[in-house]
Amino acid sequence: MDCGGDPRGREAETVTGTEGPGGLDPRTLWLGHDRPRRGRRPAFSREAITAAAIALADSEGIDAVTMRRVAAEVGAGVMSLYSYAPDKETLLDLMIDHVSGELPTTGPLTGDWRADLKNIGRLQRAHMLRHPWLPAAVQARRSLGPRTLDFLEHALAALRPSGLDGAARLEVFAQLTSFVAAHASYEIGQARAAGEPGRAAAEALYLAEVAADGRHPELAEALATAGRPVTPEAMFDRFLTRLVDGLDAG
């Protein structure tokens, strides 16, 4: 069974090869440089295992994703999963790359690199909110898969008119992704807290009392300032604009 070719097309049925402290060699994982063991074709695939893990993470959170639970979802023995992913960290890399395929990579760019970069940030935010486990996962990933690299290529192309060199464009994209992941994590946490009865009202009363105690004049002034739109989208756009408009085009 041949596992060569475009890794975004046919999925390798098993992944074997060099392993180290960080799990599989990225060339083995993404490019299929090592051939899988020959034998009877398995009843499930790396694609199915990854999809099952994503479904669990989306519905129950990343802590629900264990090798034993994923094996049960696809009807496999838990030990057989280690032929596809030697550890949960590798499985997480597979999950991140799989959902990265949801991000558009062929849309037209305007040539206004700041506008295009803001649009990329908005796409990332929506993507991370669809998969609440993703903001933390992207900051801990060990390897960039082919779908992730396609989106990176799109972002670097959007940044070309900025005049920044290649290394600086990579840094800008990393900065943007870190910002979006942090903000998405904040939004997800706030949404969960808002679901607690009376939490928002209690928090408002608490801050009002603190602002009135005379020991926090800066906070009192901030709270007394005419409010800006506080929808999650409006707040994200304000922060995104400050970040992108403040970048030095070099």
Image: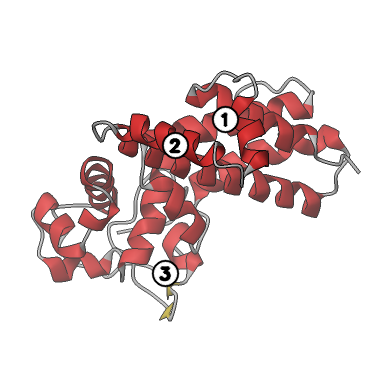
**Of the pair 37 and 134, the residue shown nearer to us:** 134
Under tag 1, what secondary structure? helix
Q: Quadrant of residue 221?
A: top right
Mark 1 belongs to which amino acid? Answer: Phe
Quarter of the figure that contains the N terminus: bottom left
Q: Which residue is mark 1?
A: 236
Vertically, is 28 above or below 211? below
- CA gap between label 2 and label 3 equals 41 Å
At 76% from the left and 46% from the top, the residue drawn is: 169
At 25% from the left and 35% from the top, the residue drawn is: 196
Within 10 Å of disc 2 (Cα), the crowding (few <14, some 14-19, many 20+) is: some
Mark 2 belongs to which amino acid? Answer: Glu
Q: Which residue is mark 2?
A: 187
Percent position of residue 24, x then y: 41, 71
**Does residue 97 appear anywhere in the picture?**
no
- CA gap between label 1 and label 2 equals 9 Å
- CA gap between label 3 and label 1 equals 44 Å
- C-beta proximity under 8 Å, tags 1 and 2: yes
Under tag 2, what secondary structure? helix
Q: Quadrant of residue 176?
A: top right
Quarter of the figure that contains the C terminus: top right
* Lateral position of residue 143 relative to residue 74, left or right: right
Q: Which residue is mark 3?
A: 34
